[in-house]
């Protein structure tokens, strides 16, 4: 028997249902953006708080503003395919666009003055899916929630209250461990000698539908050599870009992707809590950096390294930071692309190996 066309009444009911869903989605989006509650912390407020007293550097990322682009490959050995069905974790070689960077809103900051260094990656797969990740060299984060991060930014910028940072630290004791790391951890003189850590927890799903909480790190093949802060200052304002350019020109630089698997009960929502080092680790492959390119003309300049851009087989966990970072990155991206005329473009053809 042929299907009958839907009645006018049922069609009307369908339209009403669709309208209800759309309204609910718009309301949820408005709430997330802070439109229904001006006192809430919004992505725009966080990005505003990242700016130095002199104002943002127009045309640049609002944080991690200083950096250099690279191109290369991720050579997967297939060892992590049992954890995730992500195509770039199957055996093979996958193209990478990346960026070495410093955690500062000032693109002209001397390298020796910035404690945190970063690595951002976009790894592509033949099916068009991507894995984007932005990592830092700290072993854990400074604060446990996005709200606390905003509070940290505001307290550090509060020059009218000499006790602002003291009071913030008292209310957020987890900050003490990060401060200790920043003060006492050894420095290196090269991006190539740093270990970069995801800090945030993600969920890997394998072909059988099994979920597993993970974090990951990219561990350098280059042997780290400790230098003093005074030795770093003597190297000049931009020694990190010069060093990585020279190293890659001499030979490709490599990092091993190490996936750490959580045990039941390990904290997944709090990036200030490092997992014990005895957790299962899977060496999943090798990042190979082949070409360094100045950011102004490089392939990473207009990339948003949104940590929620994930392939099938990966998704966010209960950690609130990736979603918060994604929202703030979007605001930063929109602002800097709108300021393209203010960006100090270099003549085309200025890339180096």
Image (cartoon, grey):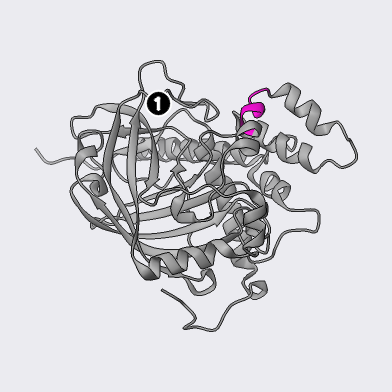
Is 325 in the magenta? Answer: no
Q: Give the range drawn in magenta.
A: 173-178
- Residue position for label 1: 277
Is 177 in the magenta? Answer: yes
**The C terminus lies in quadrant:** bottom left
The percent position of residue 46, horizontal first and vertical second, equals 67, 44
- The total of numbered circles placed on residues is 1
Looking at the image, residue 175 lies above or below residue 351: above
Query: In the drawing, does residue 203 fall left or right of residue 300?
Result: left
Give the residue at x 76% y 28%.
168
Query: In the drawing, does residue 173 fall left or right of residue 262?
Result: right
Residue at the far top in the pictured view: 265
Question: Quarter-wise, where is residue 239 in the image?
Answer: bottom right
The percent position of residue 321, horizontal first and vertical second, equals 53, 36
The percent position of residue 91, horizontal first and vertical second, equals 18, 48
Give the residue at x 46% y 27%.
318
The percent position of residue 158, horizontal first and vertical second, equals 83, 40
**The N terminus lies in quadrant:** top left
Query: In the drawing, does residue 228 fall left or right of residue 254?
Result: right
Camera-side residue of 27 and 306: 306
Q: Can residue 62 be seen in this view?
A: no
């Amino acid at each position: 028997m042929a299907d009958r066309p839907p009645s006018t009444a049922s069609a009307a009911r369908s339209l009403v249902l669709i309208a209800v869903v759309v309204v609910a989605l718009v309301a949820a989006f408005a709430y997330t953006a802070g439109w229904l509650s001006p006192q809430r912390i919004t992505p725009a407020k966080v990005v505003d708080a990242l700016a130095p007293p002199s104002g943002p550097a127009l045309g640049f990322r609002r944080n991690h503003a200083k950096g250099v682009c690279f191109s290369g490959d991720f050579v997967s050995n297939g060892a992590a395919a049992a954890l995730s069905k992500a195509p770039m974790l199957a055996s093979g070689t996958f193209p990478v666009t990346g960026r070495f960077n410093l955690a500062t809103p000032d693109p002209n900051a001397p390298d020796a003055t910035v404690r945190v260094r970063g690595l951002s990656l976009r790894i592509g797969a033949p099916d068009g899916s991507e894995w984007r990740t932005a990592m830092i060299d700290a072993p854990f984060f400074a604060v446990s929630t996005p709200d606390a991060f905003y509070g940290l930014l505001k307290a550090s910028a509060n020059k009218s209250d000499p006790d602002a940072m003291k009071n913030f630290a008292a209310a957020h004791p987890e900050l003490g461990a990060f401060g200790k790391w920043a003060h006492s951890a050894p420095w290196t003189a090269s991006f190539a000698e740093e270990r970069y850590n995801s800090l945030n927890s993600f969920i890997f799903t394998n072909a059988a539908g099994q979920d597993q909480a993970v974090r990951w790190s990219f561990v350098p093949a280059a042997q780290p050599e400790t230098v003093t802060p005074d030795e770093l200052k003597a190297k000049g304002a931009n020694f990190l870009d010069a060093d990585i350019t020279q190293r890659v020109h001499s030979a490709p630089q490599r990092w091993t992707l190490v996936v750490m698997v959580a045990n039941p009960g390990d904290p997944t929502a709090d990036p200030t809590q490092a997992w014990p080092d005895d957790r299962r680790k899977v060496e999943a492959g090798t990042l190979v950096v082949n070409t360094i390119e100045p950011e102004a003309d490089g392939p990473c300049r207009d990339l948003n390294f949104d940590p929620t851009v994930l392939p099938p087989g990966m998704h966010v966990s209960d950690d609130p930071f990736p979603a918060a970072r994604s929202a703030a990155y979007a605001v930063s991206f929109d602002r800097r692309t709108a300021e393209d005329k203010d960006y100090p473009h270099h003549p085309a053809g200025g890339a180096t190996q």
